[in-house]
Amino acid sequence: MLIRKPEDIPSSEITPEREYLNRRSFLKLAGGVGAIAAGGALVPRLLHGALVDDQPQADTPNSWDQITSYNNYYEFGTDKADPKANAQNFRTSPWSIEVGGLCNKPGHYHYEDLFKPASRVDRVYRLRCVEAWSMVIPWNGYVLADILKRFEPQPGAKYVKFTTLYDPQQMPGQRRPVLQWPYVEGLRMDEAMHPLTLLVTGLYGKPLPNQDGAPVRLVVPWKYGFKGIKAIVKIEFVDQQPMTTWMIAAPDEYGFYANVNPHVDHPRWTQAVERRIGEFRRRPTLMFNGYADQVASLYTGMDLRKYF
C-alpha cells in the first residue's frame, strides 16, 4: 500500500463527510456479505484479546461527527462525550497568547496577528491516543516553527512550554482536582521546530470546535494525543525540560516524550494495537504513528523504552 506523506495530500483530497459515511456503510455491508460467503475460511488473528486486521487499511478521514463527539478534554469533563456537551458556550474571542522566556520578542499577541489565513496549511494526520484508540483528522493550521521564529528564540532555549487557559467558570472540569491545573505541555526545541508540528485552528476547513481545542491547539502527529494541548494561552522558551501535567499526575505511566511506540505498553493496556474510531477490528500500531521516516532521526541513540 502506498502511504503518502501528509504534506503531499492536498485539502481537495479530504473525503467529504457525506461520501465518507456512504463509503463506510457500503464497506460494512460488503464485508458482511463476504464473511458469509467465505464461511469458516476467514479466521481473524487474535492479539491481546482483540480481533486484529492483518492487512493494512486506508487512512480514510474520520467524519466530522466522530471527531467532534469523541474527545479527551478534561477541562470540560472526563467522559468522551463531556467536552461536546460542556464546551458549547466557551468564549474563544477575543483571544491572545502570552509569549515569554528566552526569546527576543516576548509579549501578548492577539490571535488575529499570529494566524494569517494566507499562511494556513491543510494536513491529514493520524491521531493516536494512549488509551489505544485512534482517528484520522483533516486539520487546518500553521506550522509551529513558522510562528516560533517570529519570537526569535535565544540560543539558550532548549524547550518550548505551552499552557492552557485556566478559567473554572468556563471550564467546569477545572473545578475538580482531577489534574493539576492549568494544563501544561512541552516539546524539545527540535521537536517544536519540526515541519510536521502544527498549531491547529480548524478541521475540515471549518473553525476548530470548542470541544476539539478552540481557538488554537497543538498537534504533534507522531506523539500520543495527550501532548496536543488545547486552548493555548501561553508559550514560553525555557532551558529546562518542563514538568508536564500528565508527568505530574502519573509519572510511571506518562513520560515527557510520549512518542507512539507499539513495543512499550501502558501499565493498564497494550500499545501494540489500536481501535480506529468507526471500525470494528483493531489494527497494529505503527512506530511513531507511521511517521518514522520523517521523525525517527530526532531520537537517534535514545532508549525509547526509558524516555517514553
Image: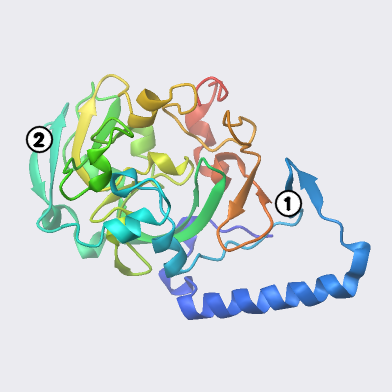
190 and 100: which one is in front? 100
- Residue at screen point 40% across, 57% down: 81
Label 2 belongs to which residue? Answer: 106
- Residue at screen point 28% across, 30% down: 180
Residue 291 lies, in percent from the top left, at 54, 45
Label 1 belongs to which residue? Answer: 52
Q: What amino acid type should be assigned to the residue bearing mark 2?
A: Pro
Decide: few, some or many residues near mark 2? Use Cα within 10 Å; few <14, some 14-19, many ≥20.
some
Decide: few, some or many residues near mark 1? Use Cα within 10 Å; few <14, some 14-19, many ≥20.
some
Label 2 element class:
loop
Distance from disc 2 to disc 1, alpha carbons, whole Å, reads 49 Å
Label 1 element class:
strand
- Residue at screen point 44% across, 30% down: 257
Residue 6 lies, in percent from the top left, at 48, 57
Dots 2 and 1: beta carbons under 8 Å? no
- Which quadrant of the figure has residue 89? bottom left
Residue 152, can we see it? yes
Residue 188, can we see it? no
- Which quadrant of the figure has residue 35? bottom right
